[in-house]
Amino acid sequence: MKKLSVENFFQEAKIRLKLTPLTSESDMTQRYIVGVDINRMGMALTGWFKWFPFERVQILGKTERDYLYTLSSLQREKILKKIMSYSIPCIIFTHKMKPHPGLLRQAKEKKIPVFLTTIPTTKFVSEISTFLEEKFAPESTTHGTLLDVYGVGVLILGDSGIGKSECALDLVERGHRLVADDMVYIKRLSSQLLMGSCSEILKHHMEIRGLGIINIESLFGSGAVRDKKRVELVVQLEEWNNRREYDRLGLTQKYYNILDVSLPFLVIPVRPGRNLAVIIEVAAMNHRLIKLGYFTAQEFSDRVNKLLQNESMQKSKHRTKSHVLKAPV
């Protein structure tokens, strides 16, 4: 089961979520977040623990904090002691509200990390949910190159040495943006959304055989790279095979499966003289047209069929007319 230590959570999210620790940072090392769900600690404060999801990050807003002050000292002490007996990963107070002294004291005794954020509760719940969904999203690694071509995330696949990086370099020179080369990290953020990125080590770098490792950002500027991009189209480069019949009309849409998400898939044969960068640019633009409801190949096929049908009708009328003229009086 995937889990995230509270220490790593704090280090990665402290700026984004505006977190300030109120307990010792050493308490974070032995606490783990095990899922994307969070819990507003409402029912537990009333003493109802039957369905208490203690394994989640616990959020306390103004309502929960103020409710604690309505309880008698004895009630409050009893409920807080019960809450702290669970293995809670951490507790976060929103609105920059100082926690009740009794809660903070008991959290320190049980070594449960407590944080403070300046973000209002509703917005914070949205922000932390998005962060945890990204951290716990299913992921995979693919050998290929990912680029932003006319706003479309194009994943280029192919055997080693087929020319993926050279094609990507040509596209960058034409004004498109590199996301990742060689190793592409892909996360499924929702049922149909795949986000691709690069490792920190390879970030903005590309390997060109005979030239070596180059830094795309240094050579072409910050506008030539981006950190992540939604993957929308997969292009497979392969050696031209004269024995294989390649798709010439594009009527049949093929798909490529990544993390149970089906993406439009194209196979582009490679041979000397083919401008792959231009072909991929057109593929990206055609993908955008299809998303807008304009399927060029189908429109062309319908037009041809209509012309053939009209010609057939004209020939049929001509035969009928000839037969009438030749008929005996």
Image (cartoon, grey):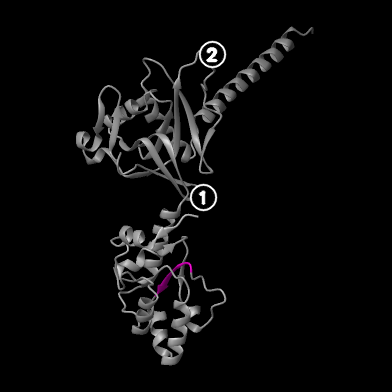
In the picture, measured across the screen, residue 19 lies left or right of residue 51, that is left
Work out whether 245 lies above or below 57: above
**Sequence-first disc among 2 and 1:** 1
Start-end of magenta stretch: 55-60
Residue identifier under label 1: 191
Residue identifier under label 2: 243
The picture places residue 280, in percent across and down from the top left corner, at 39, 29
**Residue 290 inside the magenta-drawn segment:** no
Q: Quadrant of the C terminus?
A: top right
Using a 10 Å C-alpha cutoff, classify the residue at mark 2 as few (fewer than 14 neighbours), some (14 to 19) or many (20 or more).
few
The picture places residue 262, in percent across and down from the top left corner, at 52, 40
Work out whether 269 lies above or below 177: above
Q: Are marks 2 and 1 in contact (CB under 8 Å)?
A: no
- In which image quadrant can residue 106 be found? bottom left
Work out whether 3 lies above or below 74: above
Which is more toward the observer, 114 or 85?
Answer: 85
